[in-house]
Image (cartoon, rainbow, N blue to C red):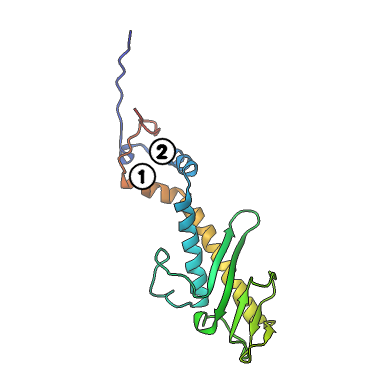
Amino acid sequence: MPTEHTFFTYSFDELTEEAQATAIDAYREARDDAWDSSDNESLAETMLYTFAEKLRAPGWDTYGSGDFPGIPGLTVEGWDLDRGESYVVRGTLYRDDAPGLPWPEDATHFSVGNRGYDDTLYGVDADGYDIELDDAAFSDAWRDALYAALAAGRNELAYLSSDEYLRERLEEGWGETFLEDGKFYSF
């Protein structure tokens, strides 16, 4: 014979502080399990926008990270925020597309990633000849921009997993209801 049970459900705001903490933990676990390509895209957009800001690429100051069109001549081949942290870009970059870099006087543009070298940047002078961009200020600024992109990605990832972010999402109330102890109610 069926047994009838009566219980109450609550919105996030109606929960005790302890129950809210339980709800946040449960939401974090559910969010981690549901991580998808749109989450990765959001991280990629944040990193590209930060990279563009460091280079002072066209549009970095008029677009946001979600609608930034990209850096002319460069493509992001990949990134990794785990153990082998990397931000891999390939292409050819001209002075006008990266005025934030301290360009050596004789370089009109440079190629990155096209020659199989990870750490050496090659430029092209006004006569079309390859030159090694061994200028320390240029190399340091380039690497700083790459590291800034990675740092922005790490920060965004940390924020998306933070209690603050998850609390904001739950406070917005997307129709979730909870049991008194903070566990999600599902019927």
Quarter that holds the N terminus: top left
What's the mark number on residue 45? Answer: none
What's the mark number on residue 170? Answer: 1
Return the residue at label 2. 23
Query: How crowded is the residue under tag 1: few (<14 C-alpha within 10 Å), some, or many (20+)?
Result: some
Q: Quadrant of residue 138?
A: bottom right
Using the image, determine if residue 64 lies above or below residue 39. Answer: below
Residue 155 position, x and y percent, is 51, 59
Q: Residue at x 63, y 92 (%)?
A: 127
Q: Earlier in the sequence, mark 2 or mark 1?
A: 2
Label 1, secondary structure: give it: helix
Q: Residue at x 60, y 75 (%)?
A: 142
Residue 58 position, x and y percent, is 45, 78
Q: Are marks 2 and 1 in contact (CB under 8 Å)?
A: yes
C-alpha gap between disc 2 and disc 1: 9 Å
Q: Is residue 79 left or right of residue 32?
A: right
Q: Residue at x 30, y 15 (%)?
A: 4
